Image (tube, grey):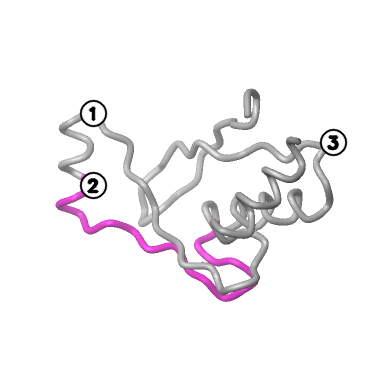
Amino acid sequence: MSGRWDTTTAVIDGQLALLVLPVIRETDPPEVREGIARRRLTATTGQCPCGAVRNMPNRAQRRADQRAGRVTRLDVAHEDGCPASDDSLLRLIAQADR
């Protein structure tokens, strides 16, 4: 999965954030490109077309992550069948990388 990540900035809860996001590659099948596009959209805007929303850790957890030098992970519960869901996207990427 080398070369599958890049960074972008977004304003989240009024704070400028640096996001590490998967890259959409032209060589990926359309289903993988759609899943990755939805993940990027959800990370930057907070909502996926499937209706899932970005859940931010609370302020105390974000500050604890910052003090410890950890990356704060965002949680998104995509609908079943959404190409951006963990199960769907991991399966699609595994099939494409064969």
**Type of amino acid at the residue the image marks with label 2:** Arg
Q: Which residue is mark 2?
A: 62
Label number found at residue 43 = none
Residue 52 vs residue 3: left or right?
Answer: left
Give the residue displayed 17% in from the left and 31% down from the top.
Answer: 68
Q: Which residue is mark 3?
A: 27
Q: Residues within 10 Å of mark 3 (few under 14, many from 20)?
A: few
* Quarter of the image that includes the C terminus: top right
Residue nearest the observer in this picture, 94 or 64: 94
Residue 18 in percent (x, y) is at 45, 36
- Residue 95 inside the magenta-drawn segment: no
Q: Are marks 2 and 3 in contact (CB under 8 Å)?
A: no
Which of the two discs, 2 and 3, sits closer to the camera? Answer: 3
Magenta stretch: helix, strand or loop mostly: loop
Q: Which residue is mark 1?
A: 69
Q: Quadrant of residue 41?
A: bottom right
The Cα–Cα distance between marks 2 and 1, rounded to whole angstroms, is 10 Å
**Type of amino acid at the residue the image marks with label 1:** Gly
The Cα–Cα distance between marks 1 and 3, rounded to whole angstroms, is 35 Å
- Note whether 33 is above or below 18 in the view shown: below
Q: Quadrant of residue 69?
A: top left
Give the residue displayed 76% in from the left and 49% down from the top.
Answer: 33
Mark 3 lies on a secondary structure that is loop
The magenta segment is: 45-62
